């Protein structure tokens, strides 16, 4: 399952890298002279992403619904990318702020989910190993998507370039849907708790007295 999750996670984060790298170019193309607002849109992505990462992390700690949460956030990233693609050229800068904020919220919110889910799937391997594999996948995918999207934008325009990212997110969503929620770390923690309870029960004076009777 991890061999499916690592590339699917790389697609999501790689799309975010490509979008962030080419954001200024896309905004200036459709809104000439708005260099300052292009930077503000980037700041909006960062700030909303911080909120998204915080909320997704808290939600995951409380619910332990790793696959469900990851899949929902992935789907919302895809939806946000589609909306951004078809509203970028409408001529309303405030719409770009809103859609970019949504993208930042869900795509950055995916990061802690990806690391935690990978740690579950690769247990008992070190969490550092799974984190490293996710980062390598994201960097390689991000470079490939950035170069590809740039080339497509040069020849066919920004919408075609963004559709490439939509396609990558769609593929990643399908891959995530087929991942089995094999929560090995959670199962191991549960078994450890059960093994700790049993010795305490046998050393309890009341239990010992009852066993003598």
Image (cartoon, rainbow, N blue to C red):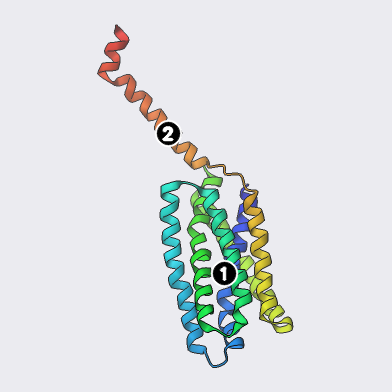
Question: Can residue 137 be seen in the rendering of this structure?
Answer: no
Would you name the residue on which mark 1 appears? 16
Q: How many marks?
A: 2
- The residue located at (40%, 54%) in the rendering is 58
Q: CA distance from mark 2 to mark 1?
A: 38 Å
Residue 53 percent location from the top left of the image: 45, 62
Would you name the residue on which mark 2 appears? 192
**Precedes in sequence: disc 2 or disc 1:** 1
Q: As rendered, which of 189 and 104 lies closer to the eye?
A: 104
- In the displayed structure, 27 sits above or below 165; it is below
- The residue located at (60%, 69%) in the rendering is 81
Residue with the most extreme top position: 213
Question: Can residue 153 be seen in the rendering of this structure?
Answer: yes
**In the rendering, which numbered label is found on residue 91?**
none
Instruction: Say left or right for 61 vs 88.
Output: left
Q: As rendered, which of 163 and 144 lies closer to the eye?
A: 163
- In the displayed structure, 92 sits above or below 74; it is below
Specify the quadrant of the image occupied by residue 203: top left
């Amino acid at each position: 399952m991890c061999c499916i999750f690592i590339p699917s996670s790389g697609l999501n984060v790689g799309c975010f890298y490509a979008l962030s790298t080419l954001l200024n170019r896309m905004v200036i193309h459709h809104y000439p002279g708005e260099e300052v607002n292009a930077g503000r849109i980037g700041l909006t992505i960062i700030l909303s992403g911080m909120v998204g990462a915080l909320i997704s992390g808290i939600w995951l700690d409380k619910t332990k619904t790793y696959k469900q949460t990851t899949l929902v956030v992935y789907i919302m990233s895809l939806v946000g990318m589609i909306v951004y693609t078809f509203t970028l050229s409408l001529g309303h800068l405030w719409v770009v702020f809103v859609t970019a904020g949504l993208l930042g919220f869900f795509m950055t919110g995916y990061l802690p989910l990806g690391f935690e889910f990978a740690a579950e799937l690769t247990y008992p391997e070190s969490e550092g190993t799974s984190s490293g594999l996710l980062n390598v996948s994201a960097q390689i995918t991000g470079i490939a998507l950035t170069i590809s999207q740039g080339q497509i934008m040069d020849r066919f325009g920004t919408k075609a370039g963004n559709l490439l990212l939509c396609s990558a997110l769609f593929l990643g969503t399908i891959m995530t849907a087929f991942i089995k929620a094999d929560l090995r770390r959670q199962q191991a923690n549960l078994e450890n708790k059960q093994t700790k309870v049993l010795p305490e029960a046998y050393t309890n004076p009341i239990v010992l007295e009852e066993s003598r009777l």
